[in-house]
Image (cartoon, rainbow, N blue to C red):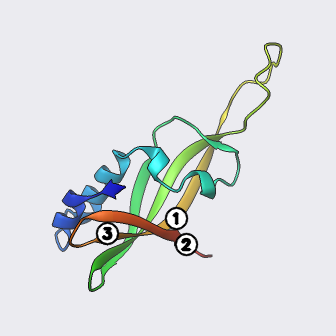
């Protein structure tokens, strides 16, 4: 479960986008929908990721935000001792829509942005 109390509290202020970015960048990447949004690789790397808030709006019980996540993935090889292929990261990007419950500050991912 991802809780974003600072983002919820910053809603309707000039600090909302930056607060949401900082809170999301501090959560465990396993909690984010990165693996299912890979396009160029097969596994999410351990490298840091960054978030940008694209848009947000308020509904009755939640704040909805569309965010872009820039991260890295790796193509898994056989990892054999004699495999000369170095493990290289590939840049990955996804856009997701998330909901922040106004009462609990719990964040849920509704799904990827449809193109």
Tell me the quarter of the picture where residue 83 sits: top right
Q: CA distance from mark 2 to mark 3?
A: 17 Å
Give the secondary structure at mark 1: strand
Q: Can you identify the residue that label 3 sits on?
A: 100
Q: Which residue is mark 1?
A: 95
Residue 109, position as x, y percentages in the image: 45, 66
Residue 21 against residue 101 in the figure, above or below: above
Q: Nearer the viewer, residue 16 or 111?
A: 111
The residue that disc 2 covers is 113
> Mark 2 falls on what kind of element?
loop
**Residue lying farthest right?**
82
Which quadrant does the N terminus fall into?
bottom left
Mark 2 residue crowding within 10 angstroms, few (<14) / some (14–19) / many (20+): few
Q: Which mark sits nearer the N-terminus, 2 or 1? A: 1
For mark 3, give the secondary structure.
strand
Give x and y (percent) for residue 34.
Answer: 55, 52
Locate residue 11: give its quadrant. Answer: bottom left
Residue at 43% from the left image edge and 48% from the top image edge: 50
Which residue is outermost to the top? 81
């Amino acid at each position: 479960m991802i809780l974003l109390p600072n983002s919820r509290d910053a809603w309707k202020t000039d600090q909302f986008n930056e607060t949401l970015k900082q809170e999301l960048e501090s959560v465990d990447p396993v909690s984010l929908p990165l693996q299912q949004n890979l396009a160029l690789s097969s596994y999410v790397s351990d490298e840091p990721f960054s978030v940008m808030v694209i848009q947000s709006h308020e509904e009755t019980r939640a704040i909805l935000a569309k965010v872009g996540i820039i991260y890295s993935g790796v193509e898994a090889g056989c990892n054999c001792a004699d495999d000369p292929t170095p493990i290289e990261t590939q840049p990955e990007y996804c856009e997701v829509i998330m909901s922040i419950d106004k009462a609990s500050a719990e964040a849920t991912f509704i799904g990827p942005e449809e193109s």
